[in-house]
Amino acid sequence: MNNCVETALFGGALLAVRDSKNVDRPPLRFSAAAWSTFVAGLGPHGADPHGTGPHRIS
């Protein structure tokens, strides 16, 4: 599927998130609380609902 994102700390209190296939676009920026809420809403397998991928966001 190629649905990959990259994350990095940004400015100390923010998290920058970007599409790893389109690095020329500016990243989205989230507070730690907003990102944690988003990740918690993904469920036990993160963005991989079948648990078959190599990486999980949980």
Image: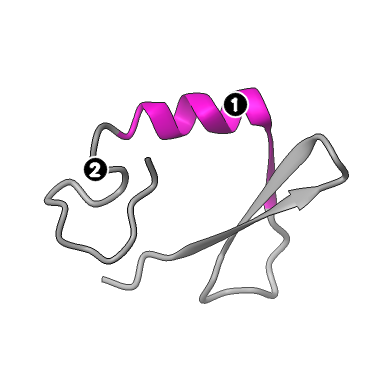
Is residue 21 depicted above or below 56 in this figure? Answer: below
Q: Does the stretch in magenta take in 4?
A: no
Please name the residue shown 74% across and 49% down the image. 9
Q: Which residue is mark 2?
A: 45
Q: Position of residue 40 (x, y in %)?
A: 39, 27
Secondary structure, mark 1, is helix
Give the quadrant of residue 33: top right
Q: Which mark is residue 34?
A: 1
User: Which quadrant: the C terminus?
Assistant: top left
Query: Looking at numbered disc 1 in the image, what kind of residue is underneath it?
Result: Ala
User: In this picture, which residue range is highlighted in magenta?
Assistant: 28-42
Residue at 88% from the left image edge and 45% from the top image edge? 11
Q: Say left or right for 38 vs 26.
A: left
Eyeballing the image, is 11 above or below 52?
A: above
Classify 46 as above or below 43: below
Q: Nearer the viewer, residue 48 or 24?
A: 48
